[in-house]
Image (cartoon, grey):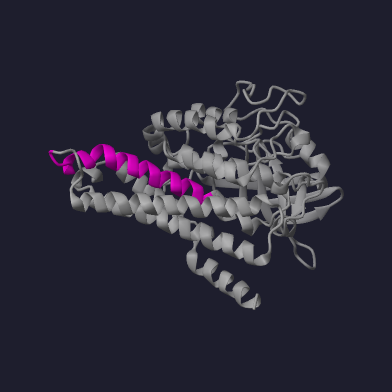
Amino acid sequence: MPTQQTSPPTSPPTSPQTSPRTAPRISPRMSGQGASRIDSAALVVAAADVAKIAAEHAQAAERDRRLAPEVVRFMLDAGFARHFVPRRHGGDAGTFEEIVRAVSVVGEGCTSAAWAASLTASLGRMAAYLPEAGQRRIWAGGPDALIVGALMPFGRARREEGGWRINGTWPYVSVVDHADWALVCAMTTEERPVARFFAVPRGSWRTEDTWSSVGMRGTGSNTLHVEDVFVADELTFTRDAIATGVADNAEAPCHRVPLKAVNGLCFAAPVLGAARAALAAWREGTAPRHTSASGGLESAAAVVLGRAAGEADTAALLLESAARTADTGRVTDLEVARNSRDCALAAELATAAVDRLFASAGTRAHQETAPLQRHWRDAHSAAGHVVLGFAGAAEAYARELQREK
């Protein structure tokens, strides 16, 4: 059932202000283009506040199948949307290492909120591949515009004077109910079709309430419909541009790396957060039942804790290493493949840690009110994303490794 009606597509707003987040926001990190800039490492600190409010609303997010507006507001005020926005538009043009750390912190409170924070940052980076005139439209109201995305080319785009006429349906668009803009991918109808991304403002699409996943319920990953909407040339770019990491006017390393070098980070960091949340829940709810009179854990429980914590720590090391590689702004084909491999492996390790903790926690962990079962469901749903498939990543890594001979 549609949850939002389509407005007339012929004259989309240049600076949409119609999302459910109607209160104006002044970010504590920057109050204007000329303000002094706090280093984007502050995002990791601010993420703790997001995690706290997200944890308080986690059960409501499960019930409502979307994040509460308060959580989204905290997420944006923390600086997630602006993290990769070019500095000339008021953003931070930040690093991948910082976003991985910040997202995993949010995940300790709510995996769905971490997923939203991660994708919000990632889509801000992708929007930097638009022509400069399009970027000015996207961030006309400031760098905190919430952009959502659909990466699969499920739409069609017909060339018209000055732009394109697009139609399409894209499922699984996370946080779409709170979005200001959407980047959707469509195939052109030319003799030689090309996959292109198109930026459409809120009011030019309608959403359909279709999200009923067993995990990650709070992401509100509903279906987005675009019907006969005109998109100007300044609001589109080719998929090849972001795939190869070639952005016009790129001033920062984050805008000069291929998508495959960093895409896994976006999806794996929330899984790491879920693993850490599961560790905290296990220590609070399960460990006391396996503590000896002297205060130490029983041997079997100590093994569970030690292995799970080690798996989570290893996942973090893999992701942070991949992020630092991407932060150089210059990666080889082998490094791209290795990053994809390591992100997939990190997601497997983090999920294995959650499995280990959940399996040892007994019947209590299976109750609907038990936090551990939510972390278990969320970890599996997030790790099931196609980008985190290990087999494909391993094959690509092996091919590149063989070429290095």
In the rendered image, the vertical position of residue 110 relative to residue 333, given as above or below? above
- The structure residue drawn at horizontal position 73% and vertical position 34%, both measured from the top left corner, is 139
Magenta span: predominant SS is helix
**Within the magenta stretch, is there residue 333?**
no
Residue 280 placement, left or right of 116: left
For the record, the magenta segment spans 267-293
Q: Position of residue 341 (x, y in %)?
A: 53, 63
Residue 319 in sight here? yes
- The structure residue drawn at horizontal position 57% and vertical position 40%, both measured from the top left corner, is 176
Q: Position of residue 188 (x, y in %)?
A: 75, 59
**Residue at the limit of the structure toward the right, as seen here:** 161
Q: Nearer the viewer, residue 243 or 179?
A: 243
**Residue at the limit of the structure toward the left, as seen here:** 293
Residue 11 in sight here? no
The quarter of the rendered structure image containing the C terminus is bottom right
Which picture quadrant has residue 234? Answer: top right
| Total residue callouts | 0
Q: Nearer the viewer, residue 135 or 280?
A: 280
Q: Position of residue 184 (x, y in %)?
A: 66, 50
Residue 234 placement, left or right of 180: right
Residue 303 placement, left or right of 167: left
Which picture quadrant has residue 141? Answer: top right
**Residue at the limit of the structure toward the front, as seen here:** 294
In the rendered image, the vertical position of residue 27 relative to residue 289, given as above or below? above
Q: Position of residue 194 (x, y in %)?
A: 75, 62
